[in-house]
Image (cartoon, rainbow, N blue to C red):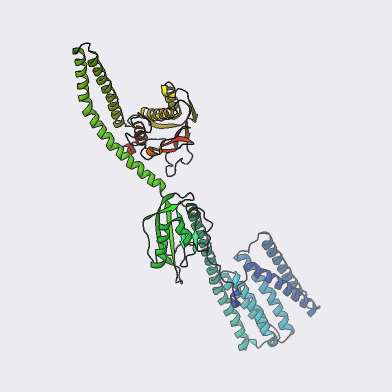
Amino acid sequence: MLTGEFPVGPAAPAPPPRGLERLSIPQPRTLLAGILVVRFALVSLVVGRSLGHDPSGPDAANASILALAFVAIVASIWLILRLARRREVPGPDGLLLQATVDVLVVTSLVAFTNSARDAGTEATSIAAMYVALVTVYALLLPVGRGLMAVAFATVCYVGVTLVAPTQPGLATDAAFWLQVGSIAFVGGLIAVLGNRLASAATGQQVLAAALQQARLEAEEILATIQSGVITIDGAGKLAYLNPRARRILGDDRAFVQGAPVLDTLRAHSPELHGAILRGLSEGGRVARGEASVRRRDGSLFPVGLSTTTFQRPGGDQRLVTAIFTDISDLKRMQEFRMRAERLEGVAALSASLAHEIRNPLMAIRSAVEQLSRLVGDDEDDQTLSRLIMRESERLNRLLTEFLDFSRVRAVNFEKLDLLELVEDAARTIRAHPAASGVELAIEGESVHLDGDADLLHRIVSNLVLNAAQALNGQGTVRVSVHREAGGGAPSLVEREIRLVVSDNGPGIPESVRERLFEPFVSGRQGGTGLGLAIVQRAVAAHRGVILMDTSAELGTTFSIYLPSTWNREDGE
């Protein structure tokens, strides 16, 4: 199945030119350098013939030759300085002036030739000199000025030849006019074709630059995108692998361009290997799929996967390109949302049950108080009464926690300094009996955010108090507040404030880690299991995320990521 070609690494180098392919039009600077060499030779020849042809000739003729030689030398020096200093070819007007000087020099040489020798024997060489001259300038000049140079050269050739005293019959010579027509035709043809050739060459250079720019941009995009891109050819060899794909797949040294990689790919991700293999054998594609990639430590993480199959123009082998993205953070966010939804359901049920139970509980408590007054001083009756009162009080406290859990709502947002709020909560916790003997360290920077002071206070208090109770009077609890540059958690870059509560205790039992934020799940004897559920709901009310990391050796760390500003539309 053909779906278009995808860039798969550097293009194959073009074969070296052979034979006539090596021929090309010289660059303008090269042509001008050749013109300078030929001009000096012609000027030397003209001056030599002028001085040696007839020393007693008219002074005006010799003076004209010397003046022309001087002009040619000045024009040559100007052209040399222009090419040497500015590193650029003169403009059309400057080139036309150079062409005029060269035509006059050649015409002077033709005049001497016609006056000294038989024109018939020299006509071919003279015509060839004009043809060469107009050919070169026709390539250098635009069409209009190129045709002007051709016309000027043709007129000079006709004029200097027809006025020669030794050739009065050339006006009717067909061969002469054929040479004149050849000069005009060749010059005009070269002027038109040369201009089109120059335009085509310029267009080719622009296209080549655009293709190179597009290639560089494509390589930069592929090198910086957050998705892995891998291309496998029909022989199972690696055609392309971008840096992100190498990081996701573990930077295996087997992933070498041009080397077979299907077996290595199967070890890293059987699903990715199977999708690529189906594309190579059947031409199929995967639009939106999932796969698992194995890390070096043996653990697996999910990736989103899509593949496309194509063939290069003129090729008969299929190539498969797979694009895959680490979706671990997306999965975690889905789990956060599902957990929040479950907590909302439990909260609604807790509020209903608390109200339904509290009313009869208050009636039972009131009835027991009345009965305790009627039974008198009987010790057993008083003991039973106190037991019922104590248990009803404990049940009332539990119902109060249920109601607190169900009433977690962020309703009063204001601009707060999170570090000051943490220090205030720490002063309260230090006075709690469970914090006796525990070192409580506060560190970080002053950061401001829009938040509900009561809910944030409860977040910090619950986490710090839980950590202190886990330490059992020995250890350190650290609370830090920082502003994250670019985001602290992957895919959570908009939550730029980080609150971390950590301890060096024994860690959270593995049996409750997966359900730690669920109601009624507690890793401490006698705990109700609502503290962390309340923290989770309070964090979610601020559109934040809470992450937990625990081990028996390093203790437990809760990392909370919060946005600094509150958008009321998000809270609705």
x, y (%) of residue 38?
A: 70, 73
User: Residue 494: within the magenta?
Assistant: yes
Q: Is residue 481 above or below residue 168?
A: above
- Left or right: residue 465 compared with residue 27: left
Q: Between 504 and 92, which is closer to the camera in this rendering?
A: 504
The reply, left or right, for residue 553 in relation to residue 173 is left
Which SS does the magenta portion mostly show?
Answer: loop
Q: Nearer the viewer, residue 60 or 336?
A: 336
* Along the line of sight, the residue nearer the viewer: 517 or 72: 517
Q: Residue at x 63, y 80 (%)?
A: 158
Residue 335 visible here: yes
Q: Quadrant of the N terminus?
A: bottom left
Quadrant of image for the C terminus? top left
Quarter where residue 132 is shown: bottom right
The part of the chain drawn in magenta is 489-495
Residue 1 appears in the picture as rendered: no
For the point 71% across and 64% down, which residue is it? 77
Q: Is residue 502 magenta?
A: no
Report the side of 437 relative to 45 (left or right).
left
In the foreground, 54 or 267: 267
Residue 543 on image: x %, y %: 37, 37
Residue occupying the far top of the picture: 377
Image coordinates for residue 483, horizontal then vertical, percent: 47, 35
- Give above or below for 467 relative to 123: above
How many labels, in total? 0
Residue 75 lies, in percent from the top left, at 69, 66
Residue 188, image quadrant = bottom right
Q: Is residue 40 left or right of residue 351?
A: right
